[in-house]
Image: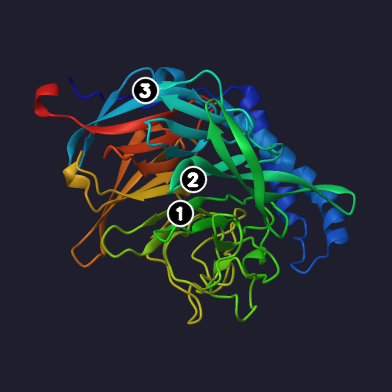
Amino acid sequence: MTILKTAPTTHTWCGETLLVILVVTCCARTMMLWPLAPLNMDIKSMMLFKQVQMPILTLVVSLASTVFAQLERDFAEEFAAPRSIMTADAGAIRVVPLASGLANPFDLAFRDNGDILVTERYTGQLRVIRDGQLLPQALTGVPPVYGEVFRAGLMSIALHPDDDALVYMTYTKAIEVDGEPEQTVALARARILEDRLVDVEEIFVAAGLDRGIAAAKLLFTPEKHLLMSIGGAYMYMGLGDYAQDPAVHYGKLLRLNDDGSAVADNPFVASGEHLPEVYSVGHRNQIGMDYHPDTGELWAAENGPQGGDEVNIIRPGANYGWPHVSYSRQYRGDWVSENERQSEFEQPEIIWWPSIAPAGMAFYSGDKIPEWQGNLFVGAMIEGRIPGTGHVERIVFNSRGQEIRREGLLRELGARITAVKQGPDGYLYALADEEYGALLRFEKLEVADQ
């Protein structure tokens, strides 16, 4: 097999596209000049604020999507066959599309019978990949998912470590506040029975309102507690302090029992300083978590708005500072904070500048690609705010656990990568989050195959 060299994709900018860019720019400037919502705004004032500013934001996002649509590649063609890539330490790697045609997949979970479950964010469907094929019918019985706003929908999935037919899902839930439609984040538990979910139960609903970017990722701990992250960016274009607000779950990492209740020895149960479910504080938007295979420490990837993405080592009761300390700029260009560090806040282990919008992450400990053992793999959704720059970031550490180099994989594909996981078979898997998305598997290419 020969190594494929993909030529750079070129785009033709038509007059309509340039007009859209002009309109988007004008709307964005209007948005940025509009007064930001005060951080202590009450619900009724927030409703009025939302009626004025949020429609402008919706227009900006909609028009921007029109521009980006003209940059989209034909991913159906990209995922039609395996591709080979050259890597720094492992040589030639084959990337195999196991199942394509997924609609904006967000997360995945492996069952003992070989099935792979995948969440589709905007359709709200739970899909099944069996024997390398995407089944035409989704599992029925998924709770009602609200997906009418930017980045809302069905998000993470996790299987109970003692019973992999017991599935947990996070999703955006429509609610009503003072007669006005709103949304929050919820957690449901259900049992898989053949082609459907049964015994579906909503076991946790977050206190607070989803104000834009509030991803919720799941991970079971070695003690079989359930970690649930909830983003705390607050207003999409504004600066909020949900992450420091003791009355809400947003901007926090939660630790729950498998029935959705708070773990009795959570760090704030005794003091009441934060809600009892809270495990750590001060997060903007965590979309990736995994345990270090050697130290057992919990590592979590966190999105900054524009630069300043982080990977943190999570410690119970610790505060990670958002938005009081940050290496990030806001989308409009100003710094999030004048301070990058303060003694009361934890410092990140890894920082990205420019932003790569880190999503799912996994430490690799498998035997399929030995050269990658001990490396951290992070899904990148977009780099430097430039569409079509998603990839998988490989981070290498020395014997003391310190970062020494990084490698971008699949840059020539340019797909948004929202999940990276090691499968029970020892392979590394990644989800490409596109309208025509796919589950990808990384395989070592032997010399005879090249």
Regarding mark 1 in the picture, which secondary structure is present there? strand
Q: In which quadrant is the N terminus drawn? A: top left
Q: CA distance from mark 1 to mark 2?
A: 7 Å
Where 304 falls versus 127 (above or below)?
Answer: below
Label located before the other in sequence (1 or 3):
3
Distance between mark 1 and mark 3 Cα atoms: 26 Å
Residues at marks 3 and 2, CA–CA distance in whole angstroms: 20 Å
Which element carries disc 2, helix, strand or loop?
strand
- The answer to whether mark 1 and mark 2 are in CB contact below 8 A is yes
Label number found at residue 73: none
| Residue 220: mark in rendering | 1
Q: Is residue 249 left or right of residue 100?
A: right
> Could you classify mark 1 by the number of other residues whose Cα lies within 10 Å: few (under 14), some (14-19), or many (20 or more)?
some
Percent position of residue 49, x then y: 83, 55
Identity, as a three-letter code, of the amino acid under mark 3? Asp
| Mark linked to residue 158 | 2
Please, is residue 224 above or below residue 360 in the view?
below
Residue 350 visible here = no
Nearer the observer, 59 or 343? 343
Q: Amino acid at mark 1?
A: Phe
Q: Residue at x 38, y 32 (%)?
A: 113
Determine which quarter of the picture holds residue 312: bottom left
- Secondary structure beneath label 3: loop
Q: Label 3, on which residue?
A: 131
